[in-house]
């Protein structure tokens, strides 16, 4: 499923409790002031919703909501599996 | 009530278990808020088990007329710091698998020690039934998740977390090894992960 900004912002609002109209693509995750486990909850929720797989390195690179949308659109589960298999072999 | 004396080290260890079970419950409470599908039922059950274990240890100490010895950081805090916060559901399950095996190994050793206080032994026996189920359902969950994540990624993740856990355990022993020597083994025996 294509992750649009609106759909991602909606999910982030549900897990973080931050009002959806406060979210912009350039909003940083720091501004949301989430504790580290709330970040895990949000990341897991988004992956489940959009059938993606994030790695710890991916999450370290993410700084804004817009980055998250982009990550969701480049981390499809099938792609990540194929990359892991290639790395392993 | 059982009047057998409890050594200061065993009191400390039971308090350590209690703190660790509380942390386990807090961790799984957060996980239970997020997971979906068939895991939701098992993870929520797991959360309540860990909270019950904290309750059992608190009651066990109370039945011995003891209060818990204050603990600073629980094992899980250091372990999570070493492996990093999980990035996805598979990593949550892999972190859990490695940790639950560590728990079973430790409770098993304590249970086998002949001098263990009868109330502590009974508490461990009760908890072990749940801990064995934790290892089993997490193993099954990881097998199910291999469809989405691929077996290779799961294997390398488990290997990475096992290495981190070994390191944290070695550090814990450096810090608290003397507390555990009453179990009748040298700290050398504690290295490596026991599975059952
Ligand atoms: Fe437990
Ligand atoms: Fe457990």
Image (cartoon, coloured by chain):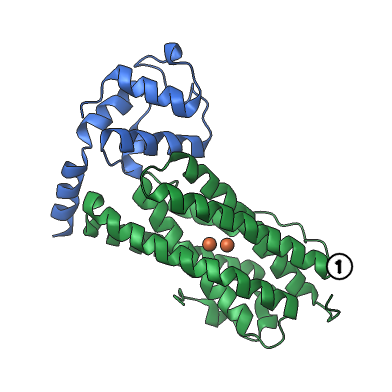
Check disc 1 and report the residue beneath it: B65
| Hue used for the chain lettered B | green
Place of residue B141 in the rendered image (x, y in percent of width and height, measured from the top left): 35, 57
User: Is residue A57 found left or right of A88 in the rendered image?
Assistant: right
Q: Would you identify the image quadrant in which residue B95 lies?
A: bottom left
Place of residue B94 in the rendered image (x, y in percent of width and height, measured from the top left): 39, 57
Foreground residue, B138 or B86? B138
Tell me if residue A59 comes above or below residue B11 in the rendering: above
Q: Chain of mark 1?
A: B
Place of residue A35 in the rendered image (x, y in percent of width and height, measured from the top left): 53, 34
Q: Residue at x 50, y 49 (%)?
A: B44
Tell me if residue A37 comes above or below residue B14 in the rendering: above
Q: Residue at x 45, y 13 (%)?
A: A22
Q: Would you identify the image quadrant in which residue B10 lies?
A: bottom right
Label 1: few (<14), some (14–19) or many (≥20) C-alpha neighbours in 10 Å: few
Q: Would you identify the image quadrant in which residue B56 lies?
A: bottom right
Place of residue B3 in the rendered image (x, y in percent of width and height, measured from the top left): 86, 79
Mark 1 residue element: loop
User: Is residue B157 found left or right of B187 in the rendered image?
Assistant: left
Q: How many marks?
A: 1
Q: Residue furthest top?
A: A21
Chain identity for the colour blue used in the image = A
Q: Residue at x 58, y 47 (%)?
A: B26
Res. B5 visible in picture? yes
* Image quadrant containing the N terminus of chain B: bottom right
Foreground residue, A64 or B49? B49
User: Is residue B22 found left or right of B67 in the rendered image?
Assistant: left
Q: Residue at x 22, y 53 (%)?
A: B147
Res. B81 visible in picture? no
Tell me if residue B173 comes above or below residue A27 in the rendering: below
Foreground residue, A27 or B175? A27
């Amino acid at each position: 499923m294509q992750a649009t900004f609106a759909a991602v912002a909606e999910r982030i609002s549900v897990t973080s409790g931050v009002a959806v109209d406060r979210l912009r693509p350039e909003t940083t995750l720091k501004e949301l002031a989430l504790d580290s486990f709330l970040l895990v909850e949000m990341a897991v929720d988004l992956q489940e919703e959009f059938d993606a797989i994030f790695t710890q390195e991916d999450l370290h690179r993410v700084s804004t909501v817009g980055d998250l949308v982009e990550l969701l659109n480049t981390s499809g589960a099938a792609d990540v599996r194929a990359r892991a298999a290639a790395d392993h072999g | 009530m059982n009047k057998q004396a409890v050594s200061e080290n065993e009191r400390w260890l039971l308090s350590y278990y209690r703190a660790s079970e509380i942390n386990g419950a807090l961790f799984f409470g957060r996980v239970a808020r997020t997971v979906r599908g068939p895991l939701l039922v098992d993870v929520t059950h797991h959360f309540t088990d860990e909270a019950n274990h904290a309750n059992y240890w608190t009651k066990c100490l109370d039945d011995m007329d003891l209060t818990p010895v204050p603990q600073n950081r629980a094992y899980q805090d250091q372990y999570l710091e070493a492996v990093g916060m999980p990035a996805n559901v598979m990593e949550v399950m892999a972190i859990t698998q490695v940790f639950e095996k560590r728990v079973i190994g430790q409770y098993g050793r304590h249970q086998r020690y002949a001098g263990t206080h009868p109330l502590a032994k009974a508490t461990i026996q009760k908890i072990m039934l749940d801990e064995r189920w934790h290892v089993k359902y997490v193993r099954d969950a990881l097998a199910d998740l291999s469809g989405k994540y691929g077996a290779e990624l799961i294997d390398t993740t488990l290997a990475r977390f096992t290495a981190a856990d070994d390191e944290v355990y070695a550090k814990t022993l450096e810090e608290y090894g003397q507390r555990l020597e009453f179990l009748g083994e040298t700290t050398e025996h504690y290295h490596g992960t026991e599975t059952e």
